[in-house]
Amino acid sequence: MRLLLVEKDAWEAGLVQEALDELEERPQERFLPRPLDLFHAETLDEALTSLTTESYDLILLSGACGLQPMLQMREAAPKTPVVLLIPREEEALALAGMREGAAGYMLKEDIDCLPLARTLRSALERHQALMSREESPHTDELTGLHTRAGFLYLGEMALKIAARWTKPARLSTVQLTGYKLMQDVYGAQARDLALIETAEMVRELLQDADLLARTGVTEFAALSIGPAESERPLEMRVESWLKARAPREGHPLPLEYFCSEEVFCAGDVSLESMLSAKAAAAAVRK
């Protein structure tokens, strides 16, 4: 197994090598394929140059310099999982990194033989699962938002980080109602326009959200970590948005929505169960 470590600090690079050497000396611990070959690049440029001629199974990238290096690595090696090594004081960077495509992260202060092995194995499995789902993209073609599968997958990862930070999470849902009437009476074009406009509304009203998705045929959801930026209830914001935009030319039927927001503690409940409950509540209100 070939690993590329991008780390300018020789001491911290040595800790990673030491942890992997210890793992090699413990054949009973079958977390990772053997042998483990670590290649060390001190700078991002050196790592990017290496990727033009070499292939690696996983990249360990120091996250001390922000997200830009990770984005460059993802562009240079899109099929190679990237694990961020983050200083404890910059752990907030981990959520942004996971959202931008990192396969995992580890605090530099926690680097040791077995914790590192578990993190790398988890990242490999997560990356393989994502690659196997390429036939079922995580982006909705019509709206450009995440699909339900993508929302659940990325959302559960975000909630694990939120639980570690003991930060609140907020699930906002929007259900477009009157959809069947719109489709039956006005046709597919009006139906698709309504869905596109709903996605536009969700983006505009929930700009602080960490994840936005079309989670069903007419269902949209947003997951936010931390306190809300707006104190106005979502339903009031939706009403204001509608008054400013409808009715108007080319809009054959006024859009109507059922909205809800719920603040909860990460780890107490699954996103999938919450989405199912919200959809059931919206069905009762139709």
Image (cartoon, rainbow, N blue to C red):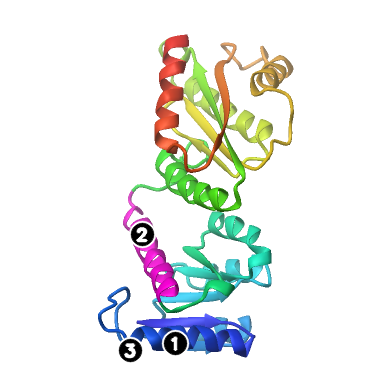
Q: Which mark is residue 131?
A: 2
Q: Is residue 42 left or right of residue 133?
A: right
Q: Which residues are magenta?
A: 114-135
- Provide the residue designation for mark 1: 38
Secondary structure under tag 3 reads loop
Q: Which quadrant would residue 199 be assigned to in this image? A: top right
Quick check: marks 2 and 1 in contact, CB under 8 Å?
no
Q: Quadrant of the N terminus?
A: bottom left
- Provide the residue designation for mark 3: 25
Q: Compared with residue 78, is residue 226 higher up or lower down, i.e. above or below? A: above
In the rendered image, residue 184, in percent from the top left (x then y), is placed at 40, 12
Q: Please tell me which of labels 3 and 2 falls first in the chain.
A: 3
Of residue 216 and residue 89, the one placed in the foreground of this image is 89
Q: What amino acid is at disc 1?
A: Leu
| Residue located 31% across and 73% down the image | 31
Residue 134 counted in the magenta span: yes
Residue 204 counted in the magenta span: no
Q: What amino acid is at disc 2?
A: Met
Secondary structure under tag 1 reads strand
Q: Is residue 53 visible?
A: no
